[in-house]
Amino acid sequence: MRYLDVDALEHMDAKAFQQRPPYPWANPAGLLTEEGYAALRDSLPAAEHFEEVFGKMRRYGQQPHDRLALEYSPDIELSPHWQAFMQELHGPHYRQFMARMLGTQAFSLRFHWHYTPASCSVSPHCDAREKLGSHIFYFNGEDDWQPVWGGQTVVLDDNGRFDSKSAPAFEDFDSATESHAMGNYSLLFTRRGNSWHGVREISCPPGHYRKVFIAVINERRPLKQFTKRLKGLFGRAA
């Protein structure tokens, strides 16, 4: 079984992606095969294996991003489908796709799952500088979710008005575009100085979760990262 739809990846328009306002983003359908998506959705990791991340303070006065989280590592227990999918994500097709969309090969990938219960949200924020972007795969369907419960990633446009080190509310932005977040859809976006995004408060019934799997794209600059570590070490020594 194949999980990534290689033809769909190759048909993604990198130029259109890079030129899209207010920063590069795309919300395509079908980057996973239908068979592969169904198998992955049916064998998602169980919530009891996740860490509870609630009430963790954020910088700049931003509200906490409450959720259950599971970080991928090769030694965690996964279904055979997820193990095979992770091999594809570490393989050449996905890396070539990501390099073409980003316009660089200087990146590394890490992966995690987020399950979000009722009354939780992701307050508007811009990602950290070492993060080049994210690729969010949505894993809710009509049998376990309703669009009115929320869960859409919101692409926000401030027309350059806000400092990234601030805490604006959703209603403060000039425009807000919601992603399609059910079924075999994903959201790819890259960080810019104004790459504001978030998720409005979830209003699902008890026992339901917004379920996403995220490929986090980090900058890979060994010399820059080594210099940053040295500064950290000398700073602590002082």
Image: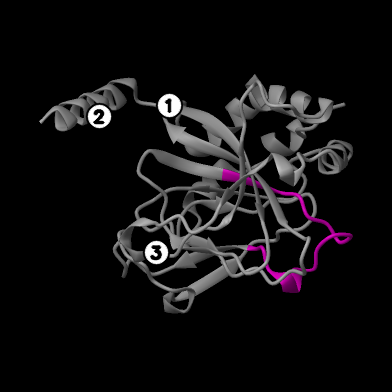
Q: Is residue 74 visible?
A: yes
- Quadrant (top left/top right/bottom left/bottom right) for the C terminus: top left
Which kind of residue does numbered mark 1 sit on? Ala
Q: Is residue 164 visible?
A: no
- Quadrant (top left/top right/bottom left/bottom right) for the N terminus: top right
Does 70 sit above or below residue 201? above
**Viewer-nearest of discs 1 and 3:** 3
Q: Residue 229: x and y, percent?
A: 26, 26
Q: Are marks 1 and 3 in contact (CB under 8 Å)?
A: no
Task: Report whether 100 appears left or right of 87.
Answer: left
* SS for callout 3: loop
Disc 3 marks which residue?
Answer: 62
First in sequence, mark 1 or 3: give its number.
Answer: 3
* SS for callout 1: loop
Does 202 sit above or below residue 128? below
Q: Residue 165: x and y, percent?
A: 30, 59
Q: Residue at x 43, y 26 (%)?
A: 106
Verify whether residue 146 appears in magenta. Answer: yes
* SS for callout 2: helix
Q: Quadrant of residue 215?
A: top right
Q: Nearer the viewer, residue 166 or 72?
A: 72
Does 13 sit above or below residue 92? below
Disc 2 marks which residue?
Answer: 228
User: What predominant SS class does the magenta segment belong to?
Assistant: loop
Write the start and end of the magenta stretch as one range: 135-152
Disc 1 marks which residue?
Answer: 106
C-alpha distance separating marks 2 and 3: 25 Å
Which kind of residue does numbered mark 3 sit on? Gln
Which kind of residue does numbered mark 2 sit on? Lys
